[in-house]
Amino acid sequence: MTRLTENAAAGPFADVKAAAAAAVEAARAEILELSHNIHANPEPAFEEVKAAAWVAEAIARHGYAVEAPVGTLPTAVRGRLTGGKGPNGPRIGVLAEYDALPGLGHGCGHNTMAASGVGAAIALSSIRDQWAGEVVFLGTPAEERGSGKEIMIGDGLFADLDAALLFHPGDRDHVEINPLASEDVTIVFKGLQSHAATDPWSGRNALDAMIALFVSVGLWRQQLPTHCRVHGIIQEGGTAANIIPDRTRAWFMIRSADQAFYDDVMKPRFTELCEAAAKAAGVEVEVEYSGYASTMKHNHVLADRWNANAAVYGIGDNPTDETSGSTDMANVSWHVPAIHPSLSITEMPTPGHSIEFRDAAARPLADEVVLLAATLVAQTALDVLLDPATKDAAWSEFRGGKASA
């Protein structure tokens, strides 16, 4: 059942916003086909070849000048569209994600994020004669691992934007998020092989170090504040039971809602645990951090416009979720005014990164939410494109001024 209503739109610029909503509805089949194709062909971080191509082709059909790839990531996409009233105006980033989870597929619903971003881009193209400035569509790979947006920031792809907008599917509707600062950590212990029965004393056991690390982490959790998370898996544990393992490898993620605590306490302490485990087992260790995601700098000016647009469709703003993962959209929020609102694609509480959430991302309710999200992203973009005061207020808040439009 759709939550969209015909010709409905919040002011100001209600007529233009209604036209954007109508454009999303007119492109319904194209938008939902993209969502379902990406869902049926899950590709993990940095390997989103099909999804990136489909996204690039879709926005190109609607007038965007497309670069694919763009920057240093082979699966990053940029599309640029100048308004019919000229280039002198705000520059709005409309984002899309499309990577899947290894072994699970789209258990985070990124297919809906790609399709809604494309839908918003289509809507804004259909009414380009109504606005000045530029819409910059960014297809952003590797959110689940590797922090693709952080790489794209380094490539300069978020430079000179006045706002960045990206929807996320969830199990309830809310605008503000409190993601945890997070990094991936690859730990490799290196020892020496020997026969596990005839002369185990000749070896140096890399698996002993790995087990010691997991035990240390388990004990460490007792003293960690509740806003912290540490979790990991062993990716390599040895080759045979009768060989002392000379190499083991793990993938951990460490997180905290407190940026300073993460930087000053968690990260150095985790490195010390790795080094202590190596010393205890008499092996060497390599610790590599990657895929950094920060906490979020939420922009209330943009959020207020999203809420006003969403209210027309019966969508309220629920309190911020007390539990949170991490996202590289937070990194973007420290460079440009940004929001990352969530809309529910389920009828009941459903954890992300689960089979049930994966399946929900391709059901009829999710389809309607894709169209709704595309509409709301487009309408919020129009608030900035058509009203210089909104852009100025968003930047004033971002820079520490008064948060009001």
Image (spheres, grey):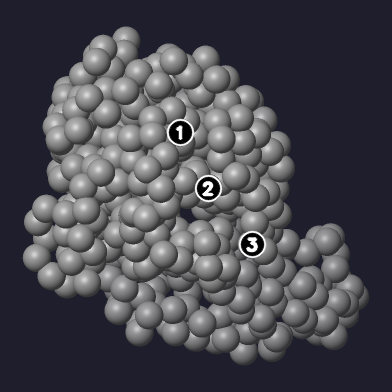
Task: Give the structural element (helix, strand or loop) at label 3.
Answer: loop
Q: Is residue 185 visible?
A: no
- In the image, 52: left or right of 308? right
- Image quadrant in which the N terminus is located: top left
- In the image, 40: left or right of 116? right
| Amino acid under disc 3 | Gly
Residue 330 point in image, percent of width and height: 37, 60
Residue 291 sits in quarter: bottom right
Distance from Cα at disc 1 to Cα at disc 3: 24 Å
Task: Give the structural element (helix, strand or loop) at label 1.
Answer: helix
- Residue, disc 2: 80
Q: Residue furthest front?
A: 85
Q: Residue drawn at (85%, 77%), measured in percent from left and top?
A: 193
Of mark 1 and mark 3, the one earlier in the sequence is 3
In front of the other: 284 or 159: 159
Residue 292 in the image: above or below residue 76: below
Of mark 1 and mark 2, the one earlier in the sequence is 2
Q: Residue drawn at (64%, 62%), measured in percent from left and top?
A: 71
| Label 1–label 2 contact, CB within 8 A | no
Q: Residue drawn at (62%, 69%), measured in percent from left and top?
A: 186
Of mark 2 and mark 3, the one earlier in the sequence is 3
Q: Which mark is residue 125?
A: 1
Q: Is residue 14 visible?
A: yes
- Residue, disc 3: 71
Please name which of the two marks, 1 or 3, marks the residue nearer to the observer.
1
Are there few (<14), some (14-19), or many (20+) residues within 10 Å of tag 3? some
In front of the other: 53 or 321: 53
